[in-house]
Image (cartoon, helix red, strand yellow):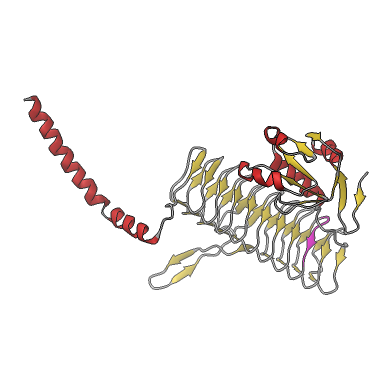
Amino acid sequence: MIRNTGQGMQAYRLSQLVATFGGELRGDDVEISQVAPLESAIAGQISFLSNPRYRKQLADTHAAAVIVAADVADLTALPAIVCADPYLYFAKVSALLNPPQRFAAGIDPGAAVAPDAEIAASAAIMANASVGSGARIGERCVIFPGVVIGDGVVVGDDTRIYANATVYAACVIGQRCTIHSGAVIGADGFGLAWNKDSWLKIPQIGRVVIGDDVDIGANTTIDRGALDDTVIEDGARLDNQIQVAHNCRIGKHTAIAGCVGMAGSTRIGAYCTVGGAAMFVGHIDIADKVHIAGGTLVSKSINKPGAYAGNYPFSTRDDWLQNAVHIRNLDKLAERIKQLEKKLAGLEGNKHD
């Protein structure tokens, strides 16, 4: 039986979780109502172990139950769900216990909605939101306060756009997307031509087209295309404060961490991951299933799947400065090595004469 805890959360027995998500139940069929880390979990909460370095926390936890892999299941006497991927299992349980908040359908009197905008009857448009002429808002969408939806924008079913995000004219957002506060979708790309003594702005006439099941983090900016569209494919995940320049393309189910910068016409393949603060020069292609470490400067195309890194390891300031001196002198050192090799080759030749 599913029970409401009285604070909007429902409680589930472990057997219900196993029936829903699989796995093996070991121990008592306890009831849980929330997830929590091993170190802070209390009665009524379930935690998980996926990283071996936290095994001691498994021994000390006060959680009601844990999610573990088979190779560590014997390390705890707590009720447990044993599965192949504890982290993924935890994510599913967390989603079950923490569903999105529901909002009443309708258009708030304080919203500014163009007369010819099409708003689904099940959508919620909150106070101070603005929806432009010819825009279409799908079923069960939630448009939070202060959001600006430009003329002709299409927003797919079950998408949520949080407070003060902006979607410029003609952009397309798919179904079940989440766009967080402060995001800007479809601003002009940085297109300029030098005209003798000043810059001439190039009109950016493309759109931003976002697929289904895409998450866009807070204050992330995605510029519209100069001619063709900037495209974010289905299932992509973009963290906070990312810059995606005009005509970029991000492949399906690619995940990009915060503070990444992508110059114009960068194309990143499907199923890639990009660590925080990585930078991409423009007009390069990244193959599918490429994994870029945080802080890496990607200065050319990557044609093969795999893991890539280009950031210099940190050290003490004095060591770093000393190494920087060596780096500045690499050309001189290389030339000295060549000269030494020539001398060595000459000595070896004399031995054989």
Q: Residue at x 40, y 58 (%)?
A: 316
Relative depth, front residue between 198 and 299: 299
The part of the image, by quadrant, that contains residue 328 is bottom left
Q: Residue at x 65, y 53 (%)?
A: 209
The reply, left or right, for residue 2 in relation to residue 264 is right
The answer to if 141 sits in the magenta stretch is: yes
Residues shaded magenta: 139-144
The part of the image, by quadrant, that contains residue 124 is bottom right
User: Where does residue 290 sit, x and y in percent of width and height?
Assistant: 53, 42
- Quadrant into which the N terminus falls: top right
The answer to if 295 sits in the magenta stretch is: no
User: Where does residue 77 sit, x and y in percent of width and height?
Assistant: 76, 39
Q: Residue at x 45, y 65 (%)?
A: 193
Instruction: Count up the numbered dots.
Output: 0
The reply, left or right, for residue 345 in relation to residue 333 is left
Q: Residue furthest left?
A: 353
Which SS type dominates the magenta stretch? loop
Relative depth, front residue between 13 and 283: 13
The reply, left or right, for residue 147 in relation to residue 6 is left
User: Where does residue 177 sit, x and y in percent of width and height?
Assistant: 72, 53
